[in-house]
């Protein structure tokens, strides 16, 4: 393979050329209610050629047969040549890498028969269905994928990498007196089949929460001190702040340039936010991004100050900064664009008990059940929540929607927990029609003052 790709690269007339070849094996079992909705095995092979003509722009061509490779190199070059760049496109320098990255799985899911995967999903599904008569529907999913990726560039980089992923999903739908509530629990990570075993607690948790929500009252709308759990904190920092840190968005958007000025204070000294694609065993982890740049720890907010942003080679050159290892593509059908990897709020030194102790009336919001952002404004729905009364957790409440301005919210974080953890959920990040890209996010509990809560 290496000789074929190198021969194709030599053929290119572009200023820079890269070829990414991908093979993905995947299986999926889905139960909906009592019925087996899907049991499938898929093999997807293909590749993409990306050519740069500096004075014109980028051109791409995708293929599913290596026999087409040489013609695709020519086609990508012709696509690049007809473009019109406002100024010559430069790429920041990166080390030339020659690496083979293989994984060792404790129980390789590729060797597990489909009927064993089906039996596992069926048993998990029966746990949820039989949990309580008020559970009226379910969606239980087992899925796995194994990706072999090869990247070769005209600069001499050649990387082979294996990327496994196992996922389980449990969605429980409960109904009582016309009220319908849903609870979802997921786990996903770059592991073997063993990661999906002995997860009965995940199924019971989703079922119990759906039942509990039937008896929860809607929260009274107002302004509260709010403590958010690591799951919601991680989603918040990813969606509300992380995307603003992606530098292709910054240099293309004058409003974002005004907001995301390095050196601007975004929060108190306790606030630290980072993105790190090199953290072991996370969904967003790879030794190299899809341009061959080594991944690394990137501080975004340090001691409350904006100190960095995320880059591809092109955006780093445009903005006079260093590549960060954040050029990622969801698969071979797409070129890499600036994306997060594993994004997190760093730990603090406050215990959860200390965080709620002086709150007379507040909200403890947990999990994330959808949301939206518009530049610095956001709104998120928590999956469930509890009232805080006189420093103690009280009754469960629902329909909790957190809304506000990102910068005012970050400045209002006055406590950060000492209980940091990484969150590995199913699904993925979406941007530029590329979805779902595997990412992780992490956080401890955090406390935010004066949050507007939508409710009754």
Image (cartoon, helix red, strand yellow):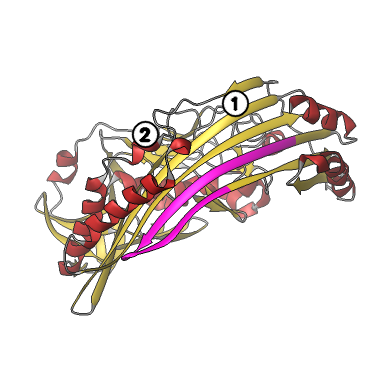
Residue 453 placement: quadrant = bottom left
Residue marked by disc 1:
294
Q: Which residue occupies 87% across, 34% down?
A: 12
Q: Which residue occupies 77% across, 39% down?
A: 66
Quadrant where the image shows the C terminus? bottom left
Q: Which residue occupies 60% across, 34% down?
A: 148
Crowding near the residue tagged with mark 2, few <14, some 14–19, many ≥20 C-alpha atoms within 10 Å: many
Q: Is residue 93 magenta?
A: no
Please say if 83 is above or below 395: above
Quadrant where the image shows the N terminus? top right
Residue 398 placement: quadrant = bottom left
Number of numbered labels in the structure image = 2
Q: Which sits in the foreground, 194 or 316?
A: 194
Q: CA distance from mark 1 to mark 2?
A: 22 Å
Residue 38 in sight in this render: yes
Image coordinates of residue 422 in percent, x first then y, are: 36, 37
212 lies left or right of 327: left
173 lies left or right of 282: left
Residue 425 in sight in this render: no
Q: Is residue 23 magenta?
A: yes
SS state under label 2:
loop
Q: Which sits in the foreground, 195 or 442?
A: 195
Image coordinates of residue 312 in percent, x first then y, are: 65, 37
SS state under label 1:
loop
Residue marked by disc 2:
346
Q: Which sits in the foreground, 251 or 96?
A: 96
Pointer 1 or 2: first along the chain = 1
Query: Magenta residues?
Result: 19-42
Q: Which residue occupies 86% across, 50% down?
A: 83
Please say if 171 is above or below 90: below
Image coordinates of residue 321 in percent, x first then y, are: 65, 31
């Amino acid at each position: 393979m290496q000789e074929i790709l190198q021969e194709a690269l030599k053929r290119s007339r572009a200023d820079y050329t890269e070829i990414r070849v991908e093979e993905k094996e995947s299986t999926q079992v889905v139960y909906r209610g009592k019925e087996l909705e899907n049991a499938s095995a898929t093999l997807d092979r293909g590749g993409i050629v990306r050519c740069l003509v500096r004075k014109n722009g980028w051109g791409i061509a995708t293929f599913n047969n290596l026999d087409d490779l040489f013609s695709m190199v020519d086609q990508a070059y012709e696509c690049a040549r007809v473009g019109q760049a406002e100024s010559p496109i430069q790429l920041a320098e990166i080390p030339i890498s020659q690496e083979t990255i293989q994984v060792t799985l404790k129980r390789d899911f590729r060797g597990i028969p489909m009927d064993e995967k089906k039996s596992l999903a069926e048993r998990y599904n029966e746990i949820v269905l039989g949990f309580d008569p008020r559970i009226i529907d379910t969606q239980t999913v087992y899925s796995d994928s194994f990706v072999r990726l090869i990247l070769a560039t005209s600069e001499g980089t050649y990387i082979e990498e294996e990327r496994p992923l196992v996922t389980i999903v449990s969605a429980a739908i409960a109904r009582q007196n016309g009220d319908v509530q849903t609870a979802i629990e997921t786990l996903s990570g770059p592991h073997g089949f063993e990661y999906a075993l002995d997860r009965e607690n995940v199924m019971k948790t989703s079922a119990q929460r759906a039942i509990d929500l039937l008896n929860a009252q809607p929260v009274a709308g107002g302004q509260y001190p709010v403590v958010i759990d690591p799951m919601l904190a991680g989603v918040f920092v990813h969606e509300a702040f992380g995307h603003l840190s992606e530098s292709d968005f910054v240099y293309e958007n004058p409003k974002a340039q005004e907001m995301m000025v390095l050196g601007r204070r975004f929060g108190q000294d306790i606030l630290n936010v980072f993105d790190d694609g090199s953290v072991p065993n996370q969904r967003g982890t790879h030794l190299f991004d899809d341009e061959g740049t080594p991944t690394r720890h990137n501080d975004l907010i340090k001691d409350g100050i904006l100190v960095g942003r995320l880059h591809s080679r092109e955006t780093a050159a445009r903005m006079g900064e260093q590549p960060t290892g954040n050029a990622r593509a969801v698969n071979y059908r797409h070129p890499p664009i600036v994306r997060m990897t594993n994004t997190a709020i760093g730990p603090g030194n406050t215990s959860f008990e200390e965080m709620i102790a002086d709150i007379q009336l507040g909200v403890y919001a947990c999990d994330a059940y959808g949301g939206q952002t518009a530049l610095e404004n956001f709104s998120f729905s928590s999956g469930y929540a509890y009232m805080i009364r006189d420093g103690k957790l009280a009754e469960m409440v629902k329909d909790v929607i957190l809304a506000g301005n990102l910068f005012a919210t970050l400045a209002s974080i006055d406590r950060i927990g000492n209980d940091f953890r990484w969150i590995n959920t199913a699904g993925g990040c979406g941007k530029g029609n590329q979805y779902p890209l595997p990412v992780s996010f992490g956080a401890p509990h955090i406390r935010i003052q004066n949050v507007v809560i939508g409710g009754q």
